[in-house]
């Protein structure tokens, strides 16, 4: 049985929807190994079409082509890929060597696509190259070789996988006569080694070296002449140990992508630099937002004990407590007759002083990780509360009892108050004395209105309070503080009873404070004004950060378009290379993987460059800000760096998918014809 058999082969090219051009007409041929066949004919006779069909580059035909008993017309993609890797090798008139690869890499290309290990493919390629007289040219680029040497490299590439069929398209068309004879000697030797060699040529001189000449005209075989026999001898090109064909591996694709990128190094550096600007901008915006947020948090923690969470009653929690007690909320708190005072007093009570019930305290005690609850009182009003010193009245708006929520950093002068002592704010003290420190030890009369009931008492100033950079009423208004025991005595002396409206919940661990605050909110209680304002500022800061990051992210979109455009250009520049890859067994997936690997590497380099630039700017910026303001403002984290790198890779790969798909869909015949 012939090794290659062609039965009733017809090939049509569509012209219009209804008309077709009949390129090959009922071709009947059979070939055996060891034959050196020349297919000759005039231009347009169909010889190149026949070559493409026999080599499996064009599968749109009618009839049968059997190779070693198998009909290649029925091959699926995987089988056709293996056919190109194992059964057929191509030698092209224009050599079709990849210009940026060395001679050795050009020859090993087919084995790289088969995922043969590096040592094996290099050893095999060197063996073939040495046999073809190219031992001293492994590291050279194609541009450093003569025409004859280039064609020898092309022959080595065709032979390296030890195929059964060699198809040569005008193998001497670009060579002078002396070099042509040398190449024909090599091709004749290949046939003598038991391979089927089919040459497409218009040269009678080339045909004269063949054992068989097939003449084609207008798509028909008009002559089939056997001229001489070639005696087989030992196959010096045979692979000693053939490895199982696999597909292009990830690392092999990365290596090929790196070699491709190296060819256009300057352009790729500029692309990576342009893309890194967007990554850098986004990272810096996130770092800025994080830095400002950290600054606010640190400032709050300096002025407020982070172990303590604040809880206040609301109308909702009061109604729930009343329902449990099955009673109405008392209209008057703190003693007889306050209703009339409240109705007739021109006081504006700004804070709703809703007292805690026993059930509320019990409910708060059930919150996990609460170690202790401290009850307190706080009010905020206009026109009711004053401090009298030497017959002069000084109004204040914020009153409260002290707790562990206040820290030593809040004490500007003096100390926290004890029994019969008060703490006043710096601004209030300066209204009395030009120097706030002079108020310490002075006796003042404090007048309060609690739920419409007047309270008075004489107390000694123990210290001067400063809110520092804290957020809350005490930071903006004159305030007076005393201990809860002192406030209870004050109420008792005025015939009233203390009704706490504020609770401080001590956490057993600082890390649990936020969880306690969330639970307080879920139960319907209000938190501290400081937390509320801080949360508002944080939310606003997050919004601004995201907006600025979004604006910076526009540059990422621009860089994605830039990468897409450059890779499209790369596909056009390397169209012929893509055709060669498909001819030697490259799958569509392999072509796609190579181009996606390039976009992956561009994204990786862009991300690393962007993170590096952002880190440098953060370092320099923080040094400058710290020298000016004593703090840092750009807080980069490993998470931001990782996000920047991953975002760069994802954007680049997505941008590279479209050019990669275009490259994978290229027709190998059209790609090989591309100049």
Image (tube, rainbow, N blue to C red):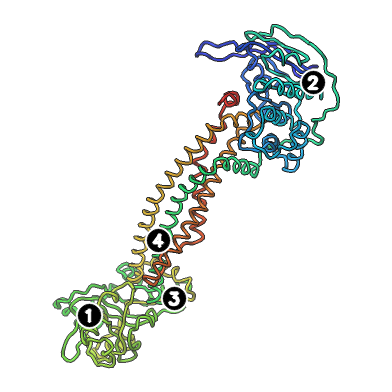
Q: Position of residue 506 (x, y in %)?
A: 43, 77
Crowding around mark 3 (Cα neighbors within 10 Å: few <14, some 14 to 19, many 20+) is many
Crowding around mark 2 (Cα neighbors within 10 Å: few <14, some 14 to 19, many 20+) is some
Query: Height in image: 546 above or below 79?
Result: below
Tell me the residue that label 1 is attached to: 396
Tell me the residue that label 2 is attached to: 33
If you read the primary sequence from the N terminus, does the residue marked by circle 2 or circle 1 appear first? Answer: 2
Where disc 1 sits, the SS reads loop
Res. 532 image quadrant: bottom left
If you read the primary sequence from the N terminus, does the residue marked by circle 3 or circle 2 appear first? Answer: 2
Tell me the residue that label 3 is attached to: 307
Crowding around mark 1 (Cα neighbors within 10 Å: few <14, some 14 to 19, many 20+) is many
Q: Which corner quadrant holds the N terminus?
A: top right
Tell me the residue that label 4 is attached to: 289
Where disc 3 sits, the SS reads loop
Query: Height in image: 1 above or below 316?
Result: above
Q: Nearer the viewer, mark 1 or mark 4?
A: 4
If you read the primary sequence from the N terminus, does the residue marked by circle 1 or circle 3 appear first? Answer: 3
């Amino acid at each position: 049985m012939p090794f290659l058999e062609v039965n009733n082969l017809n090939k049509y090219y569509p012209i219009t929807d209804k008309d077709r051009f009949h390129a090959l007409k009922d071709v009947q041929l059979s070939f055996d190994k060891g034959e050196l066949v020349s297919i000759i004919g005039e231009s347009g006779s169909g010889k190149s079409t026949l070559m493409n069909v026999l080599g499996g580059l064009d599968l749109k035909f009618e009839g049968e082509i059997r190779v070693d008993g198998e009909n290649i017309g029925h091959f699926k993609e995987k089988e056709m890929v293996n056919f190109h890797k194992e059964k057929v090798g191509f030698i092209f008139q224009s050599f079709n060597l990849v210009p940026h690869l060395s001679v050795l890499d050009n020859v090993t290309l087919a084995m790289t696509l088969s995922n043969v290990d590096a040592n094996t493919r290099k050893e095999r390629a060197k063996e073939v190259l040495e046999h073809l007289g190219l031992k001293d040219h492994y590291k050279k680029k194609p541009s450093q070789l003569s025409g004859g040497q280039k064609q020898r490299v092309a022959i080595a590439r065709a032979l390296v996988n030890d195929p059964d069929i060699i198809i040569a398209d005008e193998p001497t068309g670009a060579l002078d006569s002396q070099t042509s004879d040398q190449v024909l000697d090599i091709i004749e030797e290949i046939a003598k080694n038991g391979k089927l060699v089919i040459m497409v040529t218009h040269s009678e001189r080339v045909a004269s070296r063949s054992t068989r000449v097939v003449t084609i005209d207008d798509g028909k075989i008009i002559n089939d002449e056997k001229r001489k026999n070639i005696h087989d001898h030992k196959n010096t090109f045979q692979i000693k140990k053939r490895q199982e064909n696999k597909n292009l591996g990830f690392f092999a694709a990365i290596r090929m992508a790196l070699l491709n990128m190296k060819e256009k190094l300057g352009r790729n550096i500029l692309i990576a630099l342009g893309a890194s600007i967007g990554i850098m901008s986004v990272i810096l915006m996130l770092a800025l937002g994080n830095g400002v947020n950290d600054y606010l948090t640190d400032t709050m923690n300096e002025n407020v004990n982070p172990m303590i969470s604040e809880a206040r009653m609301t109308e909702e929690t009061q109604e729930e407590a009343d329902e449990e007690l099955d009673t109405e909320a008392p209209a008057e708190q703190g003693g007889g007759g306050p209703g009339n005072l409240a109705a007739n007093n021109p006081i504006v009570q700004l804070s709703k002083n809703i007292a805690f019930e026993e059930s509320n305290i019990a409910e708060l005690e059930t919150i996990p990780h609460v170690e202790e609850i401290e009850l307190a009182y706080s009010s905020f009003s206009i026109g009711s509360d004053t401090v009298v010193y030497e017959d002069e009245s000084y109004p204040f708006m914020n009153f409260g009892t002290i707790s562990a929520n206040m820290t030593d950093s809040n004490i500007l002068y003096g100390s926290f108050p004890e029994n019969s002592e008060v703490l006043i704010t710096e601004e209030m003290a300066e209204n009395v004395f030009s120097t706030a420190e002079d108020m310490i030890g002075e006796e003042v009369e404090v007048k309060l209105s609690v739920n419409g009931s007047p309270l008075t008492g004489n107390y000694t100033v123990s210290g001067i309070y400063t809110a520092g950079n804290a957020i809350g009423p005490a930071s903006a208004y004159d305030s007076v503080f005393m201990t809860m025991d002192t406030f209870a005595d004050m109420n008792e002396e005025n015939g009233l009873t203390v009704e706490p409206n504020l609770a401080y919940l001590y956490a057993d661990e600082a890390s649990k404070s936020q969880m306690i605050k969330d639970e307080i909110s879920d139960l319907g209680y209000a938190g501290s004004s400081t937390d509320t304002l801080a949360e508002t500022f944080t939310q606003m800061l997050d919004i601004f950060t995201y907006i600025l990051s979004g604006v910076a992210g526009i540059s990422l979109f621009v860089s994605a378009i830039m990468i897409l455009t450059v890779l499209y250009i790369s596909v056009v520049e390397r169209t012929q290379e893509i055709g060669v890859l498909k001819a030697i067994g490259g799958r569509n997936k392999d072509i796609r993987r190579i181009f996606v690997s390039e976009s992956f590497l561009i994204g990786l380099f862009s991300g690393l460059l962007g993170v590096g630039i952002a880190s440098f700017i953060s370092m320099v910026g923080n040094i400058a800000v710290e020298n000016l303001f004593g703090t840092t403002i750009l807080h980069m984290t490993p998470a931001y760096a990782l996000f920047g790198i991953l975002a760069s890779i994802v954007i680049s790969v997505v941008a590279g998918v479209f050019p990669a798909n275009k490259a994978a869909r290229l027709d190998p015949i059209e790609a090989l014809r591309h100049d």
